[in-house]
Amino acid sequence: MKILSDYHVHSSFSGDSSVSPEAVIEQAISHGLQHLCLTDHMDYDYTDGDVCFEFDPREYFRRLQPLKEKYRDQIDLCIGVELGLRPYLSGRHHSLIFSYPFDFVIGSIHLVNNRDPYFPSYFEGRDESGAYLEYFQCALQNLRAYSNFDTFGHLDYVVRYGPNQNRFYSYERYREILDEILRTLIRRDIGLEINTGGYRHGLEEPNPCREIIKRYRELGGRIITFGSDAHDPLFLGYQFDRAAALAKECGFTSYYIFRRRKPQELPL
Ligand SMILES: [Zn+2]
Ligand SMILES: [Zn+2]
């Protein structure tokens, strides 16, 4: 089955996108998507650089909710958020997601000790594998602090930006910590996102990489979600066929979408 659900998409409510929600939705319709979840960035206290990654949730719902209705005959629009996790933000995240009727919540790591691997300075003056390991340690620490979200976003995001990207990177190299992360996700019923932004960044793999997806399955993980992480609607559904084939090879026969935080299984 073709995947017609993109569950990680940004609009102008994100500090790094300038495309209106309406334009994203209309492109999604012309791409033939049946389900679209807007997941704009909410990174409280993002201090690495000048961009603000917070939106006003009241305004977000005021603007998006009527669009569900407006486009209902053409696409199933859901309203989500991508939380930028940091252990001390648990309380704020909790109150945000219980104050508004989000359909879907992604938990992602963008900042590691106040620095975003997106910027080369994150890697300066240290070896790449140590920088990757620090990212995974931060992911585990965050998961232990807060886990009320539906899927874990781009688990090896850091690899997109390493000086050698995935040339010397493998699941095996970080097996111990990655297994601990995957087991924690499974125990807490949190999905693993297959983020096709990895293909766009030249990794020839999604984030996380194939071996991690396979391992999640081996350990008993069932819930996978697909997201393009498009900040430009040109990339909606980007390489979903390739990602779906990979998920099947890893042993998955279904994937999930969410509505009002309830999972719905769809065949792969
Ligand atoms: Zn992200
Ligand atoms: Zn994103």
Image (spheres, rainbow, N blue to C red):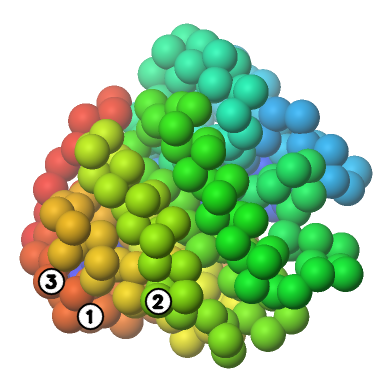
Is residue 73 visible from the viewing direction of this image? no
Q: Quadrant of the C terminus?
A: bottom left
Q: Mark 2 Cα within 10 Å, few/some/many (few <14, many 20+)?
A: few
Residue 245 marker: 1
State the residue position of label 3: 251
Q: Nearer the viewer, residue 137 or 15?
A: 137
The disc label shown at residue 64, or none: none
Q: Earlier in the sequence, mark 2 or mark 1?
A: 2
**Which quarter of the figure has residue 208?**
bottom left
Residue at 40% across, 61% down: 176
Q: Secondary structure at mark 1?
A: helix
* Residue 5 percent coordinates (x, y): 30, 56
Left or right placement of residue 64 versus residue 256 in this view:
right
Amino acid type of the residue that numbered disc 1 sits on in the rendered structure: Ala
Quadrant where the image shows the N terminus:
bottom left
| Amino acid found under the numbered disc labelled 2 | Glu
Horizontal and vertical percent position of residue 118 = 74, 62
Image vertical order of residue 233 relative to residue 88, above or below: below
Q: Percent from the top left, x then y, of residue 245? A: 22, 80
Q: Nearer the viewer, residue 4 or 133?
A: 133
Pair 2/1: label in front = 2
The amino acid sitting under disc 3 is Gly
| Distance from Cα at disc 1 to Cα at disc 3 | 10 Å
